[in-house]
Image (cartoon, coloured by chain):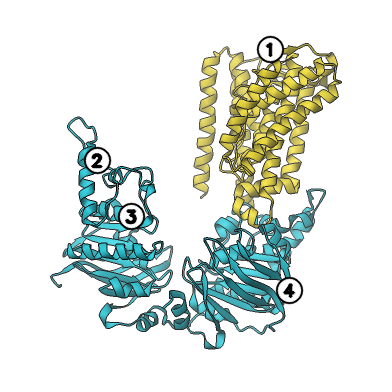
Chain colours: A yellow, B cyan
Amino acid sequence: MITKQLLIHNGRQLGTLLGLVIVTGVFAFLSPYFLTVSNLVNITQQTSINAIIAIGMTFVIITAGIDLSVGSIMAFSGIILADAIQNNIAEPFAIILGLFVGTICGLSNGLLISYGKLPPFIATLGMMSVARGAALLYSQGRPISGFAEEFRFLATGNIIGIPTSVWIMIFFYLIAYILLNKTVLGRYTYAIGGNETAANLSGINTKLFKTIVYGISGLLSAAAAVILTARLNSAQPIAGIMYELDAIAAVVIGGTSLLGGEGKISGTLIGALIMGVLRNGLNLLGVSSFIQQIVIGLVIILAVLIDMSLKRRRN
Amino acid sequence: MEDNTVLVMKRIRKEFQGVIALNEVDFVLRKGEVHILLGENGAGKSTLVKILSGAYQMTSGKIFLFNKQVNIKSPRQAQELGIGIIYQELNLIPYLSAAENIFLGREITNKFGIIDKKETLDSTNKMLKELGLEIDCDIPVINFGIAQQQMIEVAKALSLDAKILIMDEPTSALSDTEVKQLFQMIRNLKQRGVSVIYISHRLDELFEIGDRVTVLRDGIVVGTKDISDTTKTELIKMMVNRELTEHFPKRSALIGEEILRVEKLTQKNGINDISFTLNRGEVLGIAGLLGSGRTELARAIFGIDKYDSGNIYLRRKLQKIKSPKDAINQRIGFITEDRKSQGLVLILSVKENISLTNLTSFSGFGFIKSKEENKEAEEFINRLKIKTPTLDQKVIYLSGGNQQKVVLAKWLSKKADIFIFDEPTRGIDIAGKVEIYNLINQLASEGVGIIMISSELPEILGMSDRIIVMNKKKIAGEIPLKSATQELIMKYAIGA
């Protein structure tokens, strides 16, 4: 009984991992270049931005919410950050400023949802447009380019052969793991998503914690902006369009339920890697980007179909 | 079989996962009569009409309609057979007009398939006029009061050629004048030969509108009477007169000092002028029918809903409780009516649910101290004898009784000493019930003050030291245990 429970509990993550292995195996078979170290490093680097945004999305989706504004918040934070650097503010302070702006956007989402009682879909849809507009306005619609090597190191550098952006990603995943599994904040996140009424009646300040969770999502979008800006050597007001869908896809492929209350951060990382592997592998094989979109869409649908039918069988 | 018999239900039996809701029920409906179904909450009235309207399938039994056996498989089929039902919650589409609602799904169209609005409006006007309702049939029904919406539903049922009309507590949300209007319409229907099955708790009404009455209790028919041959006293007796077979353990708690006092608690559209006191070691039973204001009272004390006037004194001090958090900090525990939707996070584990109210005391700098949390959970699993393979089992997999113990553990962990139980044993088997009763007694003997809301009269009588009966959002009476009987409680609850 106990072992069966454990299997059911972690079976979902093992399943996603198996999916990653299969996809990797297929591409390794089809393309000799795929399994080289440089390509694998490349994949993780390409994945890091979506993977970081997907961390915040995981928190949000565990509370049974959704955040459509992550891509726009990323663009806006990136512009603020880049503009600050161009105006000779020291890089560390510029980064803090960017993260601060992203967090404020996220917290605003949270306030609208918790205290304004807006559905998460609507509140973040509004923010998606507002932050995008703010990014365009602030930058006059032009990219801001050209940064010092030290700043660009955040994306292009590497430590013991592994890109800095990947280290940053790992760092955030470790923090997220600890938050979700070892802290009061994490427990309340699951409780709110599992049954908000019961959580509230247990004396939890559900509004406050929901607000914090959206703040976390904004913060991580801004963190992704730092890496993107460093990698491209440019901050663009139109960056991150459709990134919200990639993040949601990574979370969902990773086994987190859109109904809330369930989900693991490890699943999200695997989900993001599956997306990265698919993009990279299809590119290597010379599959057109049009077909790539179709394939990725089908994979998302398939992953959730399998998940649902497994759950139904369990019940 | 008599000539004027419309419907015969024979030996109807309905089980829900082994629980018998109806046991060999016989029911006969005559042409043009208003037949009242009477019984406590859970007596089986709704189940019986839901079988008739196709919402439920019976486990066994036979139904004869106009001397022909029928097998009602779906609400649609019931409709086709001439059975209409008006539910407590209205089922009109709020932003469609009366005419559109009545003809929904069978719109009158011209030969091009375009809706013939004039024809639709004309037929609707005619129908409503016959029922004594003159309204604008072309504006959304949301603009009308409940009574008028009910009549529109009746018109819809009649336009489907209903011969039998089921009304489930139709007057529960109506004003006195609206009730009169409704009764006039029902008399109209009778003259047209329509038979009405009418569910209600309000005894006065029954004598005004009913022809015959069938009393149900615990899923069996106690008897059918002509209204002219019976009295309120007799009906109450039929409703509640059951043997007290359930086992209520004796309690030896000393009743101590006052722990909670409520004074003139009032909400604008809710409870009205509620005052009572609760002492340490005491179980105060609150009886009343559904909608009598019992749960609203509990929610107000626990800070879920606001109250507009009145005071709450805890341990003899005036306290303002504005949120559940305030209530919990004042060491009040609330075991809600519906533990699945309000008491527990079903997909979290036993441990996680137990510590939910008290997590901050098992944590430092926001980090949960697992060892302490586990120790606390283990202690309560042992103390309350919660049957679970591990403390990491999700509570969704536990039985109802064990789930209820997890809810109790949440509040015990927070050291609550005022407990509000709302229907503490609903959906729990007998053995589980006795365990919960024992736990309530144990709490009382430890000096906890307990409010127990229950619809089960034997439970109220078996467990309470004092009993308050609520009716229409007010306290209808307070009864000391010595003089309490099921009849007396029901009398206050119904307002007879």
Disc ID at residue A241: none
Residue toward you, B237 or B220:
B237
Disc ID at residue B316: 4
Residue at 62 percent across and 34 percent down: it is A67
Chain of the residue that carries numbered disc 4 in the rendered image: B
Q: Secondary structure at mark 1?
A: loop
**Badges 3 and 2: C-beta atoms under 8 Å apart?**
no
Chain of the residue that carries numbered disc 1 in the rendered image: A
Q: Are marks 2 and 4 on the same chain?
A: yes
Determine whether, in the image, residue A2 is placed left or right of residue B114.
Answer: right
Q: Amino acid at mark 2?
A: Glu
What residue does disc 1 label? A142
Chain of the residue that carries numbered disc 3 in the rendered image: B
Q: Secondary structure at mark 2?
A: loop
Residue toward you, A34 or B68:
B68
How far apart marks 2 and 4 lie (CA) works out to: 65 Å
What residue does disc 3 label? B148
Q: Nearer the viewer, mark 3 or mark 4?
A: 3
Q: Secondary structure at mark 4?
A: loop
Q: Secondary structure at mark 3?
A: helix
Residue B137, by quadrant, is top left
Q: Are marks 3 and 4 on the same chain?
A: yes
Labels 3 and 2: the sequence-earlier one: 2
Q: Are marks 1 and 2 on the same chain?
A: no
Q: Give the percent coordinates (x, y) of residue B471.
A: 48, 72
Measured along the vertical axis of the image, is residue B230 above or below residue B2? below
Q: Are marks 3 and 2 on the same chain?
A: yes
What residue does disc 2 label? B107
Residue at 16 percent across and 65 percent down: it is B67
Q: Amino acid at mark 3?
A: Gln
Q: Give the percent coordinates (x, y) of residue B145.
A: 38, 54
